[in-house]
Image: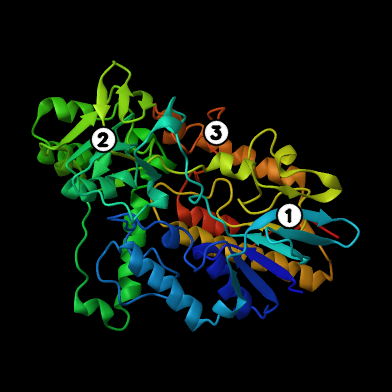
Amino acid sequence: MSQIVIIGAGFAGLGMGIKLKEAGYHDFVILEKAKDLGGTWWENTYPGCACDVPSPMYSFSFELNKNWSQLFAPQPEIQRYLAHCAEKYNIRKHIRFGESVDAIEYDDAAQRWNIALVGGEVLTPRAVISGVGALHVPSFPEIPGLETFEGKAFHSAEWDHSYDLRGKRVAVIGTGASAIQFVPEVAEVAAHTTVFQRTPAWIQSKPNIKLPAAFKLPGVPRAVRNIIYWVLEARAVSFALDPRLAGPMKWMATRHLKKQVKDPELRRKLTPDYTIGCKRVLLSNNYYPSLTRDDVDLVTEGVAEVRPNSVITKDGREIEVDAIIFGTGFKVVDAMEHWVITGRNGQKIQQAWENGVEAHHGTTVPGFPNFFVLLGPNTGLGHNSVVFMIEVQVQHILSLLKLLSDTGATTVEPKPEAVRAYNDKLHKRLRKAVWNEGGCMSWYLDQDGINRTTWPGFTFEFWADSRKARREDYILR
Protein backbone atom coordinates (compact mmCIF):
# COMPACT_ATOMS: atom_id res chain seq x y z
CA MET A 1 0.00 0.00 0.00
CA SER A 2 1.59 3.23 -1.17
CA GLN A 3 1.63 6.10 1.30
CA ILE A 4 1.38 8.73 -1.46
CA VAL A 5 -0.62 8.60 -4.69
CA ILE A 6 0.11 11.05 -7.52
CA ILE A 7 -2.54 11.40 -10.23
CA GLY A 8 -1.14 12.16 -13.68
CA ALA A 9 2.21 11.48 -15.35
CA GLY A 10 2.79 14.75 -17.16
CA PHE A 11 5.22 17.50 -16.15
CA ALA A 12 3.52 17.93 -12.76
CA GLY A 13 3.30 14.27 -11.75
CA LEU A 14 6.78 13.37 -12.97
CA GLY A 15 8.37 16.44 -11.36
CA MET A 16 6.68 15.58 -8.08
CA GLY A 17 7.79 11.94 -8.26
CA ILE A 18 11.40 12.84 -8.99
CA LYS A 19 11.59 15.27 -6.08
CA LEU A 20 9.83 12.84 -3.71
CA LYS A 21 12.54 10.25 -4.39
CA GLU A 22 15.25 12.85 -3.98
CA ALA A 23 13.79 13.76 -0.56
CA GLY A 24 13.74 10.11 0.53
CA TYR A 25 10.09 9.25 -0.18
CA HIS A 26 10.01 6.04 -2.21
CA ASP A 27 6.60 4.67 -1.21
CA PHE A 28 4.47 6.33 -3.88
CA VAL A 29 2.59 5.43 -7.05
CA ILE A 30 1.67 7.56 -10.07
CA LEU A 31 -1.68 6.82 -11.72
CA GLU A 32 -1.87 7.69 -15.42
CA LYS A 33 -5.05 7.22 -17.45
CA ALA A 34 -3.19 7.04 -20.79
CA LYS A 35 -1.02 4.18 -22.01
CA ASP A 36 2.18 6.24 -21.75
CA LEU A 37 3.53 9.26 -19.90
CA GLY A 38 3.58 12.88 -20.99
CA GLY A 39 0.11 14.15 -20.11
CA THR A 40 -0.78 16.99 -22.49
CA TRP A 41 2.28 16.14 -24.56
CA TRP A 42 1.16 12.54 -25.00
CA GLU A 43 -2.48 13.33 -25.81
CA ASN A 44 -2.05 16.30 -28.17
CA THR A 45 -0.64 15.04 -31.45
CA TYR A 46 -2.31 17.38 -33.94
CA PRO A 47 -0.24 18.52 -36.95
CA GLY A 48 2.07 21.38 -36.02
CA CYS A 49 1.76 20.74 -32.27
CA ALA A 50 4.61 22.49 -30.47
CA CYS A 51 5.37 24.49 -27.37
CA ASP A 52 4.87 28.26 -27.41
CA VAL A 53 7.33 28.78 -24.55
CA PRO A 54 11.05 28.57 -25.45
CA SER A 55 12.26 24.99 -24.87
CA PRO A 56 15.18 25.84 -22.55
CA MET A 57 12.59 27.29 -20.14
CA TYR A 58 9.96 24.64 -20.79
CA SER A 59 11.88 21.97 -18.92
CA PHE A 60 12.88 21.12 -15.36
CA SER A 61 15.53 23.40 -13.88
CA PHE A 62 17.32 20.33 -12.49
CA GLU A 63 17.32 18.46 -15.82
CA LEU A 64 18.20 20.82 -18.63
CA ASN A 65 18.05 19.36 -22.12
CA LYS A 66 20.99 20.22 -24.34
CA ASN A 67 19.46 18.29 -27.24
CA TRP A 68 16.55 20.58 -28.15
CA SER A 69 16.57 20.94 -31.94
CA GLN A 70 14.99 24.39 -31.98
CA LEU A 71 13.95 27.21 -29.70
CA PHE A 72 10.30 26.06 -29.61
CA ALA A 73 10.23 22.28 -29.37
CA PRO A 74 7.67 20.21 -31.30
CA GLN A 75 5.44 17.81 -29.37
CA PRO A 76 7.42 14.58 -30.03
CA GLU A 77 10.59 16.16 -28.59
CA ILE A 78 8.83 17.27 -25.41
CA GLN A 79 7.31 13.83 -24.94
CA ARG A 80 10.75 12.23 -25.46
CA TYR A 81 12.25 14.66 -22.93
CA LEU A 82 9.69 13.62 -20.30
CA ALA A 83 10.34 9.93 -21.07
CA HIS A 84 14.08 10.60 -20.62
CA CYS A 85 13.41 12.21 -17.21
CA ALA A 86 11.33 9.21 -16.11
CA GLU A 87 14.10 6.80 -17.13
CA LYS A 88 16.99 8.79 -15.67
CA TYR A 89 15.32 9.23 -12.28
CA ASN A 90 13.87 5.71 -12.22
CA ILE A 91 10.27 6.93 -12.07
CA ARG A 92 8.68 4.63 -14.62
CA LYS A 93 8.53 1.75 -12.12
CA HIS A 94 6.24 3.91 -9.96
CA ILE A 95 3.73 4.55 -12.79
CA ARG A 96 0.59 2.51 -13.37
CA PHE A 97 -0.66 3.19 -16.89
CA GLY A 98 -4.27 2.88 -18.03
CA GLU A 99 -5.58 3.71 -14.56
CA SER A 100 -8.46 6.20 -14.35
CA VAL A 101 -9.67 7.54 -11.02
CA ASP A 102 -13.41 7.24 -10.42
CA ALA A 103 -13.69 8.95 -7.03
CA ILE A 104 -11.58 10.12 -4.09
CA GLU A 105 -12.94 10.11 -0.54
CA TYR A 106 -11.33 10.89 2.80
CA ASP A 107 -11.78 8.38 5.66
CA ASP A 108 -11.93 10.46 8.84
CA ALA A 109 -11.47 7.48 11.18
CA ALA A 110 -8.49 5.97 9.37
CA GLN A 111 -7.05 9.38 8.36
CA ARG A 112 -6.46 7.99 4.90
CA TRP A 113 -7.82 8.62 1.42
CA ASN A 114 -9.83 6.02 -0.49
CA ILE A 115 -9.10 6.27 -4.21
CA ALA A 116 -11.58 4.23 -6.23
CA LEU A 117 -10.21 3.27 -9.65
CA VAL A 118 -12.48 2.67 -12.64
CA GLY A 119 -11.50 -1.02 -12.61
CA GLY A 120 -12.87 -1.45 -9.08
CA GLU A 121 -9.63 -1.40 -7.07
CA VAL A 122 -9.42 0.96 -4.07
CA LEU A 123 -6.12 2.51 -2.95
CA THR A 124 -5.74 3.90 0.59
CA PRO A 125 -2.81 6.33 0.76
CA ARG A 126 -2.00 8.89 3.46
CA ALA A 127 -1.64 11.66 0.89
CA VAL A 128 -2.96 12.47 -2.58
CA ILE A 129 -1.23 14.79 -5.05
CA SER A 130 -3.19 15.86 -8.11
CA GLY A 131 -0.99 16.39 -11.15
CA VAL A 132 -3.80 16.25 -13.69
CA GLY A 133 -3.09 19.75 -15.00
CA ALA A 134 -5.50 22.21 -16.54
CA LEU A 135 -5.38 21.44 -20.26
CA HIS A 136 -6.65 17.90 -20.69
CA VAL A 137 -10.48 18.00 -20.79
CA PRO A 138 -11.50 19.14 -24.31
CA SER A 139 -14.13 21.88 -24.46
CA PHE A 140 -16.82 21.58 -27.13
CA PRO A 141 -19.16 24.45 -28.04
CA GLU A 142 -22.90 23.91 -27.78
CA ILE A 143 -24.06 24.21 -31.40
CA PRO A 144 -27.59 23.21 -32.44
CA GLY A 145 -27.66 20.24 -34.79
CA LEU A 146 -24.08 19.13 -34.17
CA GLU A 147 -25.24 15.59 -33.44
CA THR A 148 -26.81 15.40 -36.95
CA PHE A 149 -23.50 16.02 -38.76
CA GLU A 150 -22.73 13.09 -41.08
CA GLY A 151 -19.10 13.97 -41.78
CA LYS A 152 -16.05 13.55 -39.52
CA ALA A 153 -15.87 15.75 -36.39
CA PHE A 154 -13.15 15.77 -33.74
CA HIS A 155 -11.31 18.01 -31.27
CA SER A 156 -7.70 19.00 -31.85
CA ALA A 157 -6.74 17.23 -28.60
CA GLU A 158 -8.27 14.01 -29.92
CA TRP A 159 -6.91 14.19 -33.47
CA ASP A 160 -8.11 11.41 -35.73
CA HIS A 161 -4.98 10.50 -37.70
CA SER A 162 -6.88 7.75 -39.54
CA TYR A 163 -8.97 10.38 -41.33
CA ASP A 164 -7.32 11.72 -44.47
CA LEU A 165 -7.95 15.45 -44.87
CA ARG A 166 -6.55 15.53 -48.40
CA GLY A 167 -9.10 16.89 -50.82
CA LYS A 168 -11.69 17.50 -48.09
CA ARG A 169 -13.70 20.62 -47.28
CA VAL A 170 -12.76 21.34 -43.67
CA ALA A 171 -14.37 23.64 -41.12
CA VAL A 172 -12.20 24.77 -38.21
CA ILE A 173 -14.19 26.14 -35.27
CA GLY A 174 -12.06 28.12 -32.83
CA THR A 175 -8.88 30.14 -33.26
CA GLY A 176 -6.90 29.66 -30.07
CA ALA A 177 -3.38 28.43 -29.33
CA SER A 178 -3.89 24.98 -30.91
CA ALA A 179 -5.76 26.21 -33.98
CA ILE A 180 -3.08 28.67 -35.03
CA GLN A 181 -0.66 25.73 -35.10
CA PHE A 182 -2.80 23.22 -37.01
CA VAL A 183 -4.70 25.53 -39.40
CA PRO A 184 -1.62 26.11 -41.63
CA GLU A 185 -1.01 22.34 -41.73
CA VAL A 186 -4.65 21.57 -42.61
CA ALA A 187 -4.71 24.30 -45.28
CA GLU A 188 -1.76 22.64 -47.02
CA VAL A 189 -3.69 19.42 -47.70
CA ALA A 190 -7.42 20.23 -47.63
CA ALA A 191 -9.33 21.18 -50.76
CA HIS A 192 -10.83 24.12 -48.88
CA THR A 193 -10.60 25.31 -45.29
CA THR A 194 -13.13 27.57 -43.57
CA VAL A 195 -11.95 29.05 -40.28
CA PHE A 196 -14.72 30.21 -37.94
CA GLN A 197 -13.40 32.91 -35.65
CA ARG A 198 -15.37 34.29 -32.71
CA THR A 199 -12.70 36.62 -31.32
CA PRO A 200 -9.35 37.42 -32.96
CA ALA A 201 -6.16 36.80 -30.99
CA TRP A 202 -3.15 39.03 -30.56
CA ILE A 203 -0.38 37.19 -32.39
CA GLN A 204 3.33 37.96 -32.38
CA SER A 205 6.07 36.49 -34.57
CA LYS A 206 7.67 33.27 -33.37
CA PRO A 207 11.49 33.48 -33.31
CA ASN A 208 11.84 29.74 -33.83
CA ILE A 209 15.55 29.36 -34.63
CA LYS A 210 17.46 26.10 -34.84
CA LEU A 211 19.65 25.86 -31.74
CA PRO A 212 23.35 25.89 -32.75
CA ALA A 213 25.89 23.24 -31.77
CA ALA A 214 27.32 25.68 -29.22
CA PHE A 215 24.09 25.21 -27.21
CA LYS A 216 25.46 21.82 -26.10
CA LEU A 217 28.62 23.27 -24.55
CA PRO A 218 28.93 23.08 -20.73
CA GLY A 219 27.12 25.92 -19.00
CA VAL A 220 25.42 27.22 -22.15
CA PRO A 221 21.95 25.66 -21.60
CA ARG A 222 21.84 27.16 -18.10
CA ALA A 223 22.96 30.60 -19.30
CA VAL A 224 20.43 30.57 -22.15
CA ARG A 225 17.67 29.49 -19.76
CA ASN A 226 18.48 32.37 -17.39
CA ILE A 227 18.39 34.90 -20.23
CA ILE A 228 15.09 33.55 -21.54
CA TYR A 229 13.58 33.61 -18.04
CA TRP A 230 14.18 37.34 -17.63
CA VAL A 231 13.09 38.14 -21.18
CA LEU A 232 9.80 36.34 -20.54
CA GLU A 233 9.39 38.02 -17.16
CA ALA A 234 9.67 41.40 -18.89
CA ARG A 235 6.53 40.48 -20.86
CA ALA A 236 4.61 40.47 -17.58
CA VAL A 237 5.17 44.16 -16.84
CA SER A 238 1.76 45.09 -18.24
CA PHE A 239 0.16 42.04 -16.56
CA ALA A 240 1.70 42.52 -13.13
CA LEU A 241 1.88 46.31 -12.95
CA ASP A 242 -0.52 48.12 -15.29
CA PRO A 243 -2.27 47.13 -18.57
CA ARG A 244 -1.45 50.61 -19.89
CA LEU A 245 2.20 49.52 -20.11
CA ALA A 246 1.35 47.04 -22.91
CA GLY A 247 2.33 49.48 -25.70
CA PRO A 248 5.50 47.68 -26.86
CA MET A 249 3.75 44.27 -26.95
CA LYS A 250 0.82 45.70 -28.93
CA TRP A 251 3.20 47.42 -31.36
CA MET A 252 5.00 44.11 -32.03
CA ALA A 253 1.73 42.28 -32.69
CA THR A 254 0.25 45.03 -34.87
CA ARG A 255 3.45 45.26 -36.91
CA HIS A 256 3.42 41.48 -37.39
CA LEU A 257 -0.20 41.59 -38.64
CA LYS A 258 0.44 44.47 -41.05
CA LYS A 259 3.53 42.76 -42.43
CA GLN A 260 1.79 39.44 -43.12
CA VAL A 261 -1.74 40.53 -44.12
CA LYS A 262 -1.98 43.14 -46.87
CA ASP A 263 -5.76 42.93 -47.45
CA PRO A 264 -7.30 45.70 -45.25
CA GLU A 265 -10.63 43.87 -44.80
CA LEU A 266 -8.97 40.63 -43.67
CA ARG A 267 -6.65 42.65 -41.43
CA ARG A 268 -9.68 44.36 -39.85
CA LYS A 269 -11.24 40.97 -39.02
CA LEU A 270 -7.96 39.84 -37.44
CA THR A 271 -7.44 42.94 -35.29
CA PRO A 272 -8.55 42.46 -31.66
CA ASP A 273 -10.56 45.17 -29.91
CA TYR A 274 -9.28 44.33 -26.42
CA THR A 275 -6.03 45.04 -24.56
CA ILE A 276 -3.19 42.71 -25.46
CA GLY A 277 -2.73 40.07 -22.73
CA CYS A 278 -6.45 39.92 -21.86
CA LYS A 279 -6.48 36.63 -23.74
CA ARG A 280 -3.40 34.47 -24.23
CA VAL A 281 -0.87 36.14 -26.55
CA LEU A 282 -0.05 33.68 -29.35
CA LEU A 283 3.08 33.13 -31.42
CA SER A 284 3.06 32.13 -35.09
CA ASN A 285 4.83 32.88 -38.36
CA ASN A 286 2.54 30.89 -40.64
CA TYR A 287 -1.03 31.36 -39.32
CA TYR A 288 -1.70 34.74 -40.94
CA PRO A 289 -0.21 33.66 -44.32
CA SER A 290 -2.45 30.56 -44.29
CA LEU A 291 -5.53 32.80 -44.02
CA THR A 292 -4.49 34.74 -47.13
CA ARG A 293 -4.62 31.61 -49.31
CA ASP A 294 -7.29 31.43 -52.04
CA ASP A 295 -8.55 28.12 -50.63
CA VAL A 296 -9.01 29.44 -47.09
CA ASP A 297 -11.88 31.62 -45.82
CA LEU A 298 -12.14 33.40 -42.49
CA VAL A 299 -15.73 33.62 -41.22
CA THR A 300 -16.49 35.95 -38.32
CA GLU A 301 -20.32 35.99 -38.39
CA GLY A 302 -20.61 33.13 -35.92
CA VAL A 303 -22.06 29.61 -36.19
CA ALA A 304 -25.83 29.31 -35.91
CA GLU A 305 -26.23 25.57 -36.45
CA VAL A 306 -24.77 22.45 -37.99
CA ARG A 307 -26.66 20.35 -40.54
CA PRO A 308 -25.82 16.85 -41.85
CA ASN A 309 -23.36 18.17 -44.45
CA SER A 310 -22.92 21.85 -43.70
CA VAL A 311 -22.38 24.67 -41.22
CA ILE A 312 -24.87 27.55 -41.13
CA THR A 313 -23.61 30.99 -40.15
CA LYS A 314 -25.61 33.48 -38.11
CA ASP A 315 -26.17 35.62 -41.21
CA GLY A 316 -27.77 32.65 -42.98
CA ARG A 317 -24.95 31.38 -45.20
CA GLU A 318 -24.68 27.62 -45.72
CA ILE A 319 -21.13 26.29 -46.04
CA GLU A 320 -20.83 22.66 -47.13
CA VAL A 321 -18.10 20.74 -45.32
CA ASP A 322 -16.82 17.17 -45.04
CA ALA A 323 -15.13 17.55 -41.65
CA ILE A 324 -15.26 19.77 -38.58
CA ILE A 325 -12.21 20.25 -36.38
CA PHE A 326 -12.71 21.94 -33.02
CA GLY A 327 -9.88 24.17 -31.86
CA THR A 328 -11.97 25.31 -28.90
CA GLY A 329 -9.51 24.65 -26.11
CA PHE A 330 -10.09 22.98 -22.78
CA LYS A 331 -12.30 23.10 -19.73
CA VAL A 332 -10.11 24.78 -17.15
CA VAL A 333 -12.06 26.33 -14.25
CA ASP A 334 -15.11 24.09 -14.66
CA ALA A 335 -12.94 20.96 -15.05
CA MET A 336 -12.06 21.23 -11.34
CA GLU A 337 -15.73 21.64 -10.47
CA HIS A 338 -16.42 18.17 -11.88
CA TRP A 339 -13.88 16.40 -9.66
CA VAL A 340 -15.47 13.64 -7.57
CA ILE A 341 -13.65 14.36 -4.32
CA THR A 342 -15.05 14.13 -0.78
CA GLY A 343 -13.08 15.59 2.11
CA ARG A 344 -13.40 15.60 5.88
CA ASN A 345 -16.92 15.18 7.32
CA GLY A 346 -18.33 14.24 3.91
CA GLN A 347 -17.74 17.65 2.34
CA LYS A 348 -17.70 17.58 -1.46
CA ILE A 349 -15.08 19.68 -3.24
CA GLN A 350 -17.96 21.50 -4.98
CA GLN A 351 -19.26 22.58 -1.56
CA ALA A 352 -15.84 23.87 -0.59
CA TRP A 353 -15.78 25.80 -3.87
CA GLU A 354 -19.41 26.98 -3.94
CA ASN A 355 -18.19 30.58 -3.88
CA GLY A 356 -15.46 29.94 -6.44
CA VAL A 357 -12.48 27.68 -7.05
CA GLU A 358 -9.56 28.67 -4.82
CA ALA A 359 -6.71 27.19 -2.81
CA HIS A 360 -3.87 28.24 -0.51
CA HIS A 361 -0.87 29.07 -2.70
CA GLY A 362 -2.80 27.26 -5.45
CA THR A 363 -2.06 23.97 -3.68
CA THR A 364 -4.14 23.11 -0.58
CA VAL A 365 -7.85 23.34 0.33
CA PRO A 366 -9.41 23.58 3.83
CA GLY A 367 -11.21 20.39 4.85
CA PHE A 368 -9.11 18.22 2.53
CA PRO A 369 -6.22 16.88 4.66
CA ASN A 370 -3.03 15.76 2.90
CA PHE A 371 -4.56 16.68 -0.46
CA PHE A 372 -2.32 18.73 -2.74
CA VAL A 373 -3.02 20.23 -6.17
CA LEU A 374 -0.27 20.97 -8.68
CA LEU A 375 -1.20 23.71 -11.17
CA GLY A 376 -4.21 24.48 -9.02
CA PRO A 377 -6.26 27.70 -8.95
CA ASN A 378 -4.40 30.88 -9.97
CA THR A 379 -1.10 29.22 -10.85
CA GLY A 380 -1.47 29.56 -14.63
CA LEU A 381 0.64 32.04 -16.57
CA GLY A 382 0.24 34.31 -19.55
CA HIS A 383 3.91 35.10 -20.01
CA ASN A 384 6.32 32.43 -18.75
CA SER A 385 6.68 28.66 -18.25
CA VAL A 386 4.24 26.82 -15.97
CA VAL A 387 7.00 24.27 -15.37
CA PHE A 388 8.58 26.95 -13.16
CA MET A 389 5.31 27.18 -11.20
CA ILE A 390 5.14 23.37 -10.88
CA GLU A 391 8.64 23.29 -9.38
CA VAL A 392 7.73 25.96 -6.82
CA GLN A 393 4.59 24.02 -5.83
CA VAL A 394 6.59 20.79 -5.56
CA GLN A 395 8.90 22.53 -3.07
CA HIS A 396 5.84 23.82 -1.21
CA ILE A 397 4.39 20.29 -0.91
CA LEU A 398 7.74 18.86 0.20
CA SER A 399 7.93 21.51 2.92
CA LEU A 400 4.47 20.42 4.14
CA LEU A 401 5.51 16.73 4.14
CA LYS A 402 8.59 17.72 6.13
CA LEU A 403 6.35 19.58 8.55
CA LEU A 404 4.39 16.36 9.11
CA SER A 405 7.62 14.44 9.63
CA ASP A 406 9.14 16.99 11.99
CA THR A 407 6.04 17.35 14.17
CA GLY A 408 4.86 13.74 14.13
CA ALA A 409 1.47 14.92 12.89
CA THR A 410 -0.61 12.69 10.61
CA THR A 411 -2.44 15.30 8.53
CA VAL A 412 -2.00 18.86 7.34
CA GLU A 413 -4.51 21.26 5.81
CA PRO A 414 -4.66 25.05 5.48
CA LYS A 415 -6.51 27.24 7.98
CA PRO A 416 -9.62 28.80 6.35
CA GLU A 417 -8.54 32.28 7.48
CA ALA A 418 -5.12 31.83 5.86
CA VAL A 419 -6.75 30.79 2.57
CA ARG A 420 -9.12 33.77 2.78
CA ALA A 421 -6.31 36.24 3.39
CA TYR A 422 -4.17 34.80 0.58
CA ASN A 423 -6.97 34.83 -1.98
CA ASP A 424 -8.35 38.23 -0.97
CA LYS A 425 -4.92 39.72 -1.59
CA LEU A 426 -4.54 37.81 -4.86
CA HIS A 427 -7.96 38.83 -6.23
CA LYS A 428 -7.56 42.44 -5.20
CA ARG A 429 -4.56 42.49 -7.50
CA LEU A 430 -6.29 40.50 -10.25
CA ARG A 431 -9.26 42.88 -10.39
CA LYS A 432 -6.92 45.60 -11.67
CA ALA A 433 -5.07 43.29 -14.07
CA VAL A 434 -5.44 43.00 -17.83
CA TRP A 435 -7.50 39.78 -17.68
CA ASN A 436 -10.33 41.68 -15.96
CA GLU A 437 -9.70 45.20 -17.24
CA GLY A 438 -8.70 44.35 -20.81
CA GLY A 439 -12.20 44.18 -22.29
CA CYS A 440 -12.45 40.50 -23.20
CA MET A 441 -13.96 37.24 -21.99
CA SER A 442 -11.53 34.32 -21.76
CA TRP A 443 -11.11 30.85 -20.30
CA TYR A 444 -9.17 32.50 -17.48
CA LEU A 445 -12.49 33.70 -15.99
CA ASP A 446 -15.29 31.74 -14.32
CA GLN A 447 -19.00 32.30 -14.97
CA ASP A 448 -18.96 35.26 -12.56
CA GLY A 449 -16.12 36.94 -14.43
CA ILE A 450 -13.59 36.17 -11.68
CA ASN A 451 -10.11 35.01 -12.69
CA ARG A 452 -9.56 31.58 -11.13
CA THR A 453 -6.74 30.61 -13.47
CA THR A 454 -3.77 32.97 -13.65
CA TRP A 455 -1.14 34.22 -11.24
CA PRO A 456 -1.37 38.04 -11.18
CA GLY A 457 2.31 38.91 -11.08
CA PHE A 458 5.87 37.94 -11.82
CA THR A 459 6.84 34.30 -11.30
CA PHE A 460 9.69 35.25 -8.96
CA GLU A 461 7.01 36.68 -6.64
CA PHE A 462 5.29 33.29 -6.54
CA TRP A 463 8.66 31.65 -5.88
CA ALA A 464 9.45 34.02 -3.00
CA ASP A 465 6.00 33.64 -1.45
CA SER A 466 5.19 29.98 -2.02
CA ARG A 467 8.26 27.74 -2.19
CA LYS A 468 8.16 27.10 1.56
CA ALA A 469 4.95 26.68 3.56
CA ARG A 470 4.50 28.76 6.73
CA ARG A 471 3.58 26.54 9.65
CA GLU A 472 1.24 29.15 11.16
CA ASP A 473 -1.00 28.87 8.06
CA TYR A 474 -1.80 25.19 8.65
CA ILE A 475 -3.74 22.88 10.93
CA LEU A 476 -1.68 19.86 11.99
CA ARG A 477 -3.43 16.84 13.50
Mark 1: give few (<14), some (14-19) or many (20+) Cα within 10 Å. many
On the image, the x and y values in percent for residue 353 come to: 69, 39
Residue at the (21%, 79%) spot, across then down: 214
Residue at the (73%, 40%) spot, across then down: 352
**Hey, which residue is sitting farthest right in the picture?**
109
Mark 2: give few (<14), some (14-19) or many (20+) Cα within 10 Å. many
Q: Secondary structure at mark 2?
A: strand
Q: Is 206 or 80 nearer to us in this picture? A: 80
User: In front of the other: label 3 or label 1?
Assistant: 1
Residue at the (59%, 80%) spot, across then down: 93
Q: Is 343 or 375 nearer to us in this picture? A: 343
- Residues under labels 3 and 1: Cα distance? 24 Å
Q: Quadrant of residue 31?
A: bottom right
**Quarter of the N terminus within the rendering:** bottom right
The earlier-in-sequence mark between 1 and 2 is: 1
Task: Please state which amino acid type lies under the numbered disc 1.
Answer: Ile
On the image, the x and y values in percent for residue 3 come to: 75, 71
- Determine if residue 370 is in view: no
Q: Secondary structure at mark 3?
A: loop
Task: Please state which amino acid type lies under the numbered disc 3.
Answer: Asp
- Residues under labels 1 and 2: Cα distance? 41 Å
Q: Are marks 3 and 2 in contact (CB under 8 Å)?
A: no
Residue located beneath label 2 in the image: 195
User: In front of the other: label 3 or label 2?
Assistant: 2
Q: Are marks 3 and 1 in contact (CB under 8 Å)?
A: no
Q: Is residue 325 above or below residue 459?
A: above
Task: Please state which amino acid type lies under the numbered disc 2.
Answer: Val
Residue located beneath label 3 in the image: 446
On the image, the x and y values in percent for residue 309 come to: 31, 31
The earlier-in-sequence mark between 3 and 1 is: 1
Which mark is on residue 104? 1
Q: Quadrant of residue 322?
A: top left
